[in-house]
Amino acid sequence: MVLCVSALLSCSQKAEDRLFEQKVTTALKQQMEHYPQSTLLDIYKSFFQDKFGPGHLLSDTAAAGQYLRRELNSYNPDTLAFLSPYIDSTGWERRFVRVDLRVIKEGMVSYRDFFDSFVRSVQAAPDVPLEDWTGEWTRIVDILEKLQCPVIHHPQYTIDKDSITVLLQRGEYVGHHSPIYVASYAPHYRLIAAEELQSLGF
């Protein structure tokens, strides 16, 4: 009986591992297809955003609102060579999405509804132990290298990989887009919980 239970648990774990690899693989391929200038820093950012949500972005609601208004005032999509999708997925679990600020600029969503949805998304952000995230990120990198994802041939790859390791060893997890990503795609978005999309009319 003990052997049967052990075998079932082993099979279940293998199935979970396969599903994890499939979903991570899909997310990695999507990232590189949509944003070929991505570096490891940008891949990391997508996965950590999906894991932790926007909780790290809101320590002061009033200040966050002022910052959003300033960004909206300086954001002119008509001058950009690249426009991101209105809604873009993150990571492999798809818990949080990036919603481009164009939805406000173009009148698709009111500022108030957008900001309220953002605040609720912050409140919904999960509390993930850093140790768990560190282990998950290691598995993601293993899959990325197994796939021979183009990003591993980037001149900065080893440097970026080491910098993320140091970040996690310091007990931190927040990463930033690479300079080449910012220059290529001019990202202007906020993270919104996927479950909030319906309230925004999507």
Image (tube, rainbow, N blue to C red):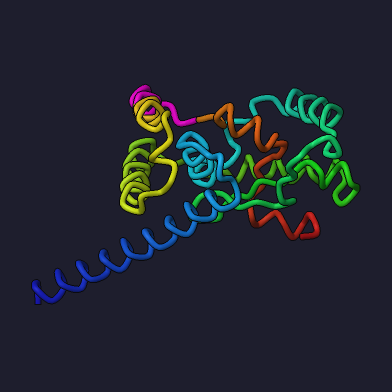
Q: Residue at x 38, y 65 (%)?
A: 19
Q: Residue at x 37, y 22 (%)?
A: 170
Of residues 43 and 63, the one nearer the viewer is: 43
Residue range (magenta):
166-174
State left or right for residue 41 relative to residue 137.
right
Q: Residue at x 53, y 43 (%)?
A: 46
Question: What is the x, y in percent for residue 115?
Answer: 78, 40
User: In the picture, residue 72 is in which quadrant?
Assistant: top right
Question: What is the x, y in percent for residue 167?
Answer: 40, 25
Can I make out residue 171 in this image?
no
Of residues 197 and 119, the one nearer the viewer is: 197
Q: Is residue 18 above or below residue 190?
A: below
Of residues 175 and 178, the one nearer the viewer is: 178
Question: What is the x, y in percent for residue 20?
Answer: 38, 59
**Quadrant of the snapshot with the N terminus:** bottom left
On whether residue 172 falls in the magenta region, the answer is yes
